[in-house]
Image: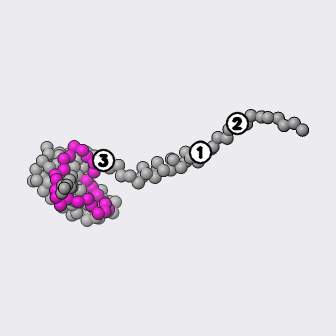
């Protein structure tokens, strides 16, 4: 009896399940992570406050306003002056009512530059209140107490 020696190929693992798992992980983390540019705008220098603290929980229905020192208001990815903002917030108010969202459930997050005139911020809050938007969060940098 004689045995023939044959060269066998090295076994290669099936990569399909590995690729599937990697794709699922990428999908999961892409959905989980909030990539909101409105909350990360680097053009705004938030004022520093000793009492500022991060929110405990995210708001249920947030809408973010970025307010620049020149009076420009960024709302839903577009920039407005105060008159344009009045029309935009009116359309937004109409839209949320059509979607059966209560205006009282919407949280308006105001990210104003430290050099923004206070009167402008008051005008913006008044415009929102006229449309029954009542919850406001003002963003500031947390002051290091060290």
What SS does tag 3 mark?
A: loop
What SS does tag 2 mark?
A: loop
Which numbered disc flags the more N-terminal residue, 3 or 1? 1
Graded by Cα atoms within 10 Å as few (under 14), some (14 to 19) or many (20 or more), the crowding at tag 3 reads: few
Q: Residue at x 22, y 63 (%)?
A: 135
Label 1, on which residue?
Answer: 16
Label 2, on which residue?
Answer: 9
Task: Based on the picture, tell me whether residue 43 belongs to the magenta stretch.
Answer: yes
Q: Which circle, 3 or 1, is nearer the viewer?
A: 1
Q: Which circle, 1 or 2, is nearer the viewer?
A: 2
Dominant secondary structure (helix, strand or loop) of the stretch shown in magenta: loop
Which numbered disc flags the more N-terminal residue, 1 or 2? 2
- Mark seen at residue 37: 3
Graded by Cα atoms within 10 Å as few (under 14), some (14 to 19) or many (20 or more), the crowding at tag 2 reads: few
Say if mark 2 contacts mark 3, CB within 8 Å.
no
Instruction: Report how far apart the C-alphas of labels 2 and 3 lie in the structure.
Output: 52 Å
In this view, 34 is above or below 97 = above
83 left or right of 103?
Answer: left
Image quadrant containing the N terminus: top right
Counting from the top left corner in percent of width and height, residue 115 is at: 12, 47
């Amino acid at each position: 009896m004689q045995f023939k020696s044959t060269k066998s190929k090295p076994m290669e693992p099936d990569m399909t399940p590995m690729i599937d798992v990697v794709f699922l992980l990428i999908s999961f983390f892409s959905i989980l992570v909030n990539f909101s540019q409105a909350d990360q705008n680097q053009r705004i220098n938030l004022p520093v406050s000793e009492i500022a603290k991060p929110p405990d929980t995210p708001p249920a229905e947030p809408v973010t306003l970025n307010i620049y020192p020149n009076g420009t208001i960024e709302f839903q990815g577009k920039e407005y002056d105060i008159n344009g903002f009045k029309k935009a917030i009116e359309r937004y108010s109409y839209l949320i009512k059509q979607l059966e969202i209560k205006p009282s459930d919407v949280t308006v997050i105001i990210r104003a530059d430290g050099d923004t005139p206070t009167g402008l911020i008051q005008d913006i809050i008044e415009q929102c209140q006229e449309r029954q938007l009542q919850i406001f969060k003002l963003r500031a940098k947390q002051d290091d107490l060290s």
